[in-house]
Image: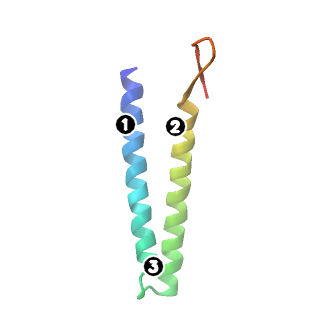
Amino acid sequence: MEKEKEEQQEQKENLEQMFENLEDVIARLEGEDVSLEQSFELYNQGMTLLKKCSRSIDEVEKKVLILDEEGNTHEF
């Protein structure tokens, strides 16, 4: 049980860091002095980060437990 909490905390930190990195990429893309080549590179970085975020969120969702009418828990 302790290990699961540590993994969830690590995933949360990783997800938060990925979102921060994604925000940085977006801010750089919105800059006025970005060349076309830089835009493509930043776009690819952003899409890679977005895919990682999506996978991480999917993993967390799979671990969510549902409480049924009888009070028993089942994985989501």
Q: Secondary structure at mark 3?
A: loop
Q: Which badge, 1 or 3, comes first in the chain's sequence?
A: 1
> What residue appears at the point 36 percent right and 31 percent down from the top-left corner?
6
Q: 70 or 17, which lies in front?
A: 70
Instruction: Determine whether, in the image, residue 28 is placed left or right of residue 69.
Output: left
- The mark found on residue 51 in the picture is none
- Residue lying at the far front in this picture: please name it: 69
Quadrant in the rendering for residue 76? top right
Return the x and y of residue 39 as percentages of the image width and height.
50, 79
Residue picked out by circle 1: 9
> What residue appears at the point 48 percent right and 73 percent down from the top-left corner?
42
Q: Is residue 33 above or below residue 58?
A: below
Quadrant in the rendering for residue 3? top left
C-alpha separation, residue under disc 3 versus residue under disc 2 = 31 Å
Q: Secondary structure at mark 1?
A: helix
The amino acid type of the residue labelled 2 equals Val
Disc 3: CA contacts within 10 A as few (<14), some (14-19) or many (>=20):
few
Residue picked out by circle 3: 30
Residue picked out by circle 2: 60
C-alpha separation, residue under disc 1 versus residue under disc 2 = 11 Å
